[in-house]
Image: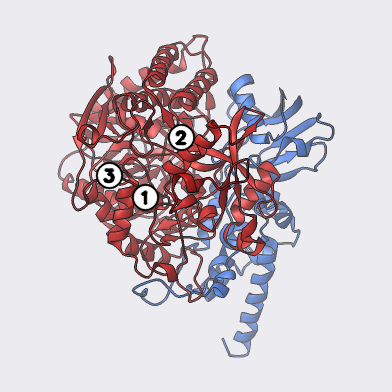
């Protein structure tokens, strides 16, 4: 299969209903790794993404990727087992232990592979991949390339996509999965460049669309990290798992909420309150600033609540300081040049000379599309990997540096599984044309309803209200009464969504229409988050209930599953956590 | 309040482009990108532009931005503060799309040609030996040689600013040559000769007229013009070595 540089133009002419073995939705790290693997298994592969793959939010990952390489002098005794234990303990024992074992045992090998493909990691003095300490880890285990690891990894994987001539369609927003008889046959979406609806038929589809951060207002996520990818699987009948577990990253800069990598603390940065006191000793005396993210975020929130933070006048929110001045300019320029630029650009602050005002911001969705260890969902031929999926390796709280690792390990596994499935289906016919046509018609009519809506509600107003609700009531600390307010509010929004004002016409790069669709997805996924949080009457990992401050293993050592119900309330069920070697115990740092 | 003058053009509907003007309220710390989103959310939802990370790392929002205080330049909308463009807190900010590329709509351009040139230089590592069991050994000093060029986010600001790219669509562009240097200087790569031959022609190195716009506008402070002159030197040395029978 030759790579066609003009694929988009070609596509318009003759690719209507073009068929692929595997179609990957999303061009971030998980999507690209899945595509490379599926192609190497002999499948015909297409990557569709609403952005060019290099614009994906994976590129904004800064700190690094975990693997027990033992390259750092302080990590001589590191091993996959220790990495596994740290991850499970970090997850507050909600992670499936078989999945974590798979991830940590293949970590080293998959990082070496990435290095062989050219990923420009920083180096130790003896020329090996450099590793830095990260939160919740027993050893310096996080492989890094300065503070731009995600960017380097994303470019490296895209370079392999070019090398292997994998087809890519950009500016294509997938809005609908064709699922019939519990089997996925392809997808439909908006080709934003051409301004039309398109259908792509596939033996199998991998959803790799990243997180849902933009449901929140204060988030480190890109503007494009909406919940749409999760929602299309959810609407197609796949449950969303453990959605109540939302990670708040301790160190987002005020006002813009852009991330200061955990590497800042890994390299020795301190978090101090308004009395210039390092308060983490009160909350995690051993690991201090390098405790897992849920603990550090809660500690900062507590300091602010108890009046030991600063107040940011623009929005009245509290903040504390991240102080890196003692690291010295040489170390900052070598290891943290990117975050220094961010502070200079957006706050006018030079981290070499001044502390940075930071506050916890929404950062990651531990939950997502329910999959097994191969990315398989309950719908035949539908797979998911990366942040949009929940396997679950992160459980109730993800350790920094494990998300990039997850994209590689489980991206590869889902690519492999999808290619195998497609091969097994080769003898069967694709979905009959008539069925596709009828589905297309259904979709078009559904779509026209949005396009021709004539109410008075503006999507920006609804979006702002959704974000404010989530920020205020579904944040770091939660309580039953607050969650109930949030749920009522989201259900009102769901109703008001029916009366949106008429968007601008046309489908060509039409923000009005894409915002409509993403808002609908956001509301539905937010509802799943709140319902899960309301029903989980315990505190575990990132989910802390003021009314239920303790972990309750007898009642809640289980995964929440939320099923979409177009006609009424979300259906909730639970499934057990896989425990192999490590029995749950008290989590202390 | 400031006035945004924004390039508007839909090739299917309009014969010529025009500029739309929008009153945008702003406060200290607000970026041009936030101003554009204000327009979509509150004034005109049909405006089209690309944006994603809003943290100057994804490269989506490169466009031409000029204000009262700064001359026009290709830059990222997301890390350009409105206050830096205005003289006394008021005035006009003018925004146009990247040049030399076909326009899909308003500020959104078709980057196909830009990426085709990038892909033509084989932008991936070509190692010779079968890879070692663990990682390739590369000293910090060796890695320093690629430190600059790996930071390129392929936003296209350099390409838009290059007059040569405007007059000759076949020109590989500053980004392609910077990326060539990235692999040429990587100690793990072994395709030096091939890389030189891919750009050592009248579509590549010798099409550059040393105008240095790319160096001035790079939002990541990289130096594509420097990369081009470095690669020219390497090519000349290789030719001389060839003539002397050493290559």
Q: Which quadrant of the rendered structure holds the N terminus of chain A?
A: bottom left
Foreground of the two, A159 or A1 = A159
Q: Which residue is mark 3?
A: A93
Dot placed on the residue nearer the N-terminal end, 2 or 1: 2
State the separation of the CA atoms marked 2 and 1: 17 Å
Q: Nearer the viewer, mark 2 or mark 1?
A: 2
The residue singled out by tag 1 in the image is A407
Measured along the vertical axis of the image, is residue A85 above or below residue A481?
below
Characterize the local packing of mark 3: few (<14), some (14-19) or many (20 or more) Cα atoms within 10 angstroms. Answer: many
Colour chain A is painted in: red
Tell whether B170 sits left or right of A584: right
Q: Indicate which disc, 3 or 2, sits on the residue closer to the N terminus.
A: 3
What is the chain identity of the residue bearing mark 1?
A
Q: Which mark, by number, is residue A352? A: none
Give left or right: position of A489 versus B198: left
For the image, the number of numbered tags is: 3
């Amino acid at each position: 299969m030759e790579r066609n540089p003009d694929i988009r133009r070609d596509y318009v002419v003759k690719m209507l209903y073009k068929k692929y073995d595997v179609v990957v939705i999303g061009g971030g790290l998980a999507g690209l790794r899945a595509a490379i693997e599926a192609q190497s298994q002999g499948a015909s592969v297409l990557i569709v993404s609403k952005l060019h793959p290099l614009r994906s939010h994976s590129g904004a990952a800064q700190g690094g990727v975990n693997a027990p390489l033992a390259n750092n002098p302080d990590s001589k005794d590191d091993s996959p087992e220790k990495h596994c234990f740290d991850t499970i303990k970090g997850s507050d024992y909600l992670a499936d232990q078989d999945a974590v074992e798979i991830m940590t045992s293949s970590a080293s090998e998959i990082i070496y592979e990435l290095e062989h493909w050219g990923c420009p990691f920083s180096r130790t003095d003896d020329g090996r991949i450099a590793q830095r300490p990260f939160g919740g880890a027993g050893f310096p285990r996080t492989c890094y390339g300065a503070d731009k690891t995600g960017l380097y990894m994303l470019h490296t994987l895209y370079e392999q996509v070019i090398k292997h001539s994998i087809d890519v369609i950009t500016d294509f927003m997938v809005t609908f999965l064709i699922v019939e008889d519990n089997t996925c046959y392809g997808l439909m979406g908006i080709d934003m460049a051409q301004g039309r609806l398109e259908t792509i038929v596939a033996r199998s589809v991998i959803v790799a669309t990243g997180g849902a951060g933009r449901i929140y207002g204060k988030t480190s996520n890109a503007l494009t990290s909406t919940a749409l990818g999760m929602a299309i699987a959810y609407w197609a009948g796949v449950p969303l798992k453990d959605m109540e577990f939302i990670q708040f990253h301790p160190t987002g800069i005020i006002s813009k909420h852009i991330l200061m990598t955990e590497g800042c603390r890994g390299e020795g940065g301190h978090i101090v309150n308004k009395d210039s006191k390092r308060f983490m000793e009160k909350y995690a005396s051993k690991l201090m600033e390098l405790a897992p993210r849920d603990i550090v975020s809660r500690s900062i929130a507590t300091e602010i609540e108890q009046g030991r933070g600063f107040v940011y006048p623009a929005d009245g929110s509290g903040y504390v300081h991240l102080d890196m001045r003692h690291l010295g300019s040489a170390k900052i320029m070598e290891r943290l040049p990117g975050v220094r630029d961010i502070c200079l650009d957006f706050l006018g602050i030079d981290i070499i000379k001044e502390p940075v005002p930071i506050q916890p911001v929404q950062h990651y969705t531990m939950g997502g599309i329910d999959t097994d260890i191969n990315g398989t969902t309950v719908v035949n031929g539908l797979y998911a990997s990366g942040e949009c999926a929940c396997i679950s390796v992160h459980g109730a709280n993800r350790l920094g540096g494990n998300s990039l690792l997850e994209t590689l390990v489980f991206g590869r596994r889902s690519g492999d599984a999808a290619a195998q499935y497609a091969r097994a289906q080769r003898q069967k016919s694709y979905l009959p044309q008539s069925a596709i046509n009828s589905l297309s018609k259904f979709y078009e009519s559904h779509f026209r309803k949005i396009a021709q809506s004539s109410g008075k509600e503006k999507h920006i107003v609804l979006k702002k209200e959704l974000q404010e609700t989530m920020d205020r009531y579904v944040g770091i600390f939660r309580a039953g009464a607050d969650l109930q307010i949030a749920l009522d509010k989201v259900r009102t929004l769901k109703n008001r969504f029916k009366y949106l004002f008429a968007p601008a016409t046309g489908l060509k790069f039409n923000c009005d229409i894409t915002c409509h669709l993403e808002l609908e997805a956001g509301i539905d996924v937010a509802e799943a988050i709140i319902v899960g949080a309301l029903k989980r009457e315990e505190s575990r990992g990132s989910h802390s209930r003021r009314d239920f401050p303790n972990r309750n293993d007898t009642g809640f050592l289980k995964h929440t599953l939320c099923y979409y119900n177009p006609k009424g309330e979300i259906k909730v069920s639970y499934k057990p956590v896989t425990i192999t070697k490590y029995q749950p115990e008290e989590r202390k740092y | 309040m400031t006035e945004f003058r924004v390039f508007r053009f839909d090739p299917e509907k309009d014969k010529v482009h025009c500029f739309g003007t929008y009153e945008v309220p702003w406060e200290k710390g607000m970026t041009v990108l936030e101003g554009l989103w204000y327009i979509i959310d509150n004034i005109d939802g049909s405006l089209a532009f690309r944006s994603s990370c809003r943290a100057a790392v994804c490269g989506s929002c490169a466009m031409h931005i000029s204000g009262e205080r700064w001359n026009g330049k290709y830059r990222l909308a997301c890390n350009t503060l409105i206050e830096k463009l205005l003289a006394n807190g008021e005035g006009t900010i003018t925004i146009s799309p990247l040049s030399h590329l076909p326009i899909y709509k308003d500020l959104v351009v078709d980057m196909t040609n830009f990426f085709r040139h990038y892909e033509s230089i084989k932008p991936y590592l070509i190692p010779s030996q079968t890879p070692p069991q663990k990682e390739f050994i590369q000293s910090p000093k060796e890695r320093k040689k690629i430190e600059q060029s790996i930071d390129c986010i392929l936003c296209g600001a350099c390409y838009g600013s290059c007059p040569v790219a405007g007059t000759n669509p076949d020109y590989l562009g500053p980004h392609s040559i910077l990326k060539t240097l990235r692999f040429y200087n990587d100690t793990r790569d072994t395709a030096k000769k091939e890389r030189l031959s891919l750009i050592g022609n009248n579509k590549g190195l010798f099409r550059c007229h040393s105008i240095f716009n790319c160096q001035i506008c790079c939002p990541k402070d990289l130096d594509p013009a420097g990369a081009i002159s470095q690669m020219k030197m390497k090519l000349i040395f290789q030719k001389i070595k060839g003539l002397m029978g050493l290559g």
